[in-house]
Image: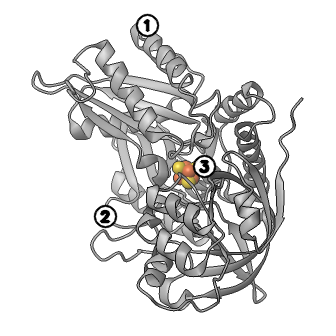
Amino acid sequence: MHSNVVPLLELIRKTSTDLPEDVRKALLKALEEEQKNTVSEYALKIMQRNIDLAKGKSQPLCQDTGSILFYIKTPIGFDQKAFEEEIKEAVSLATDKGYLRQNSVDSLTGKNSGNNLGPGTPTIYFEQHSHDYLDIRLILKGGGCENVGAQYSLPDTTLGAGRDMKGIQKVILDCVTKAQGRGCSPGILGVIIGGDRSTSYSASKKLFLRTIDDVNPEENLKELEESLLKEANETNIGPMGFGGKTTLLGVKLGVLNRLPASFFVTVSYMCWSYRRQGIILNNKSEIEKWLY
Amino acid sequence: MAVLEPHKFTLPLTEKDVRSLKKGDLVFLSGIIYTGRDAVHKYLYEGHEPPISLENAVIYHCGPVVLKEDNIWRVTAAGPTTSIREEPYQATLIEKFKLKAVIGKGGMGEKTAKACRDFGCVYLHAIGGAAQVYAEHIISVKNVYLREEFGDPEAIWELEVKDFPVVVVIPAS
Ligand code: SF4
């Protein structure tokens, strides 16, 4: 019983304290490209130091350990209910050990549950795959960057954005401009074009499972990702809004079908403290592989 | 080649120190600072007297993670929190306590900016997410106030810092 709790706890620990390789690389590149002897370069250096310290001390990268989002693929016929209980146990243990901050607050009374468990927390998405192992991925997404996410309904007359590529581009850049440094830039965007109000937001976060350096297989989306990244980095918002060359580290786009009457563009913003990890767990509850 | 020279200060700051700072300056602070976030700001704004003198003090918008080991408090994570939530209260506190600096992230509004100009205070931006770096610059926890009332993250922590790195975003002059 509960033999999965230990590897799940290790997954949470690593996610909260150690940034994945692709994120480190992107931040290092930003540091190299930033104008020397500026506060922006200095901010990027502090981020580097923070990454090393957190890993070395096995302590959270950021004190806001964020929303806890699990994405799990299970073998067909797998007992999801039992596994959910194990996840909750691991989350509560990780909170006790300080890998997660007490981050689950009753929205009416303001009372903190103290163990990160409560209605809607943690968030767990299950799907099935035809393998005999578990593919478990975890994203920790902070509140500061969550607050600067935005959903647009096209046409947007205030922004002059129609239901076309130009309109899509316009609203996405509007989100970046409004966010300034408040989402702890340099950030990463997850953008869904289409869907309804809820499917689009959850799909936009799921895009954060992609690595920063991966390439969108859809040619037109790939081009849009590249041009949005380029334009965002020309805004001179820069790290923490101090000005500079890197405002975003990456842009990830996805498309969902929509109703003829609706046209949503939904943007989730992930801060530089882009905490994402994953494991392959075999049926003996052993971690076979780290996924990032 | 230009070198980014930090302006180093030992606290408390004088009005002259504060007025010498420009937007974009890098500042290293050493001395005593006090954390305060939503609960503390509302409490003081409503007219309660602070448990310690905040005259000329530096306030840090931060809900630190603090552990007690062998009866000694130790800060393990202490990055800034979003400042704009204190906008309704900040100007009043700057005036009342002659605060010399407010540290946080994300900037503040016009009311705070005006209080900074009128009363000689500066808003300093810490690097968001750098919880471990800031914890390293906190050399000791001197005391904690209002912990019973507000809990750990919302209490007033009296912290001794060394070369605490921040950037001027709202200057006094
Ligand atoms: S937005 Fe900033 S403060 Fe919030 S989790 Fe991310 S790095 Fe931390």
Instruction: Answer yes or no: are tags 2 and 3 on the same subunit.
Output: yes
Q: Amino acid at mark 1?
A: Glu
Distance in Å between CA atoms under marks 1 and 3: 31 Å
Q: Which residue is mark 1?
A: A219
Residue A43 pos. (x, y %): 71, 43
Q: CA distance from mark 1 to mark 2?
A: 40 Å
If the image is split into quadrants, where does the C terminus of chain B sit?
Answer: bottom right
Mark 3 Cβ inside 8 Å of ligand 1: no
Q: What residue does disc 3 label?
A: A15
Residue A42 % position (x, y): 76, 42
Of labels 2 and 3, earlier in sequence is: 3
Residue A217 visible in the displayed image: no
- Comparing B91 with A50, the one in front is B91
Query: Subunit of mark 3?
Result: A
Give residue A66's position: percent from left, percent from top: 49, 55
Disc 1 with disc 2 on a shared chain: yes
**Cβ–Cβ below 8 Å for labels 1 and 2?**
no
Q: Quadrant of residue A126?
A: top left
Residue B98: quarter of image: bottom right
Q: How far apart in space, not on screen, are marks 2 and 3 (Cα)?
A: 23 Å
Tell me the kind of residue under disc 3: Thr
Front label number (1 vs 3)? 1
Q: Quadrant of the N terminus of chain B?
A: top right
Q: Residues within 10 Å of mark 1 (few under 14, many from 20)?
A: few
Q: Foreground: A122 or A111? A: A111
Tag 1–tag 3 contact (CB < 8 Å): no
Query: Which of the chains bears the disc numbered 2?
Result: A
Q: Residue furthest left?
A: A261
Vertical placement of A196 versus B71: above or below? above
Q: Secondary structure at mark 3?
A: helix
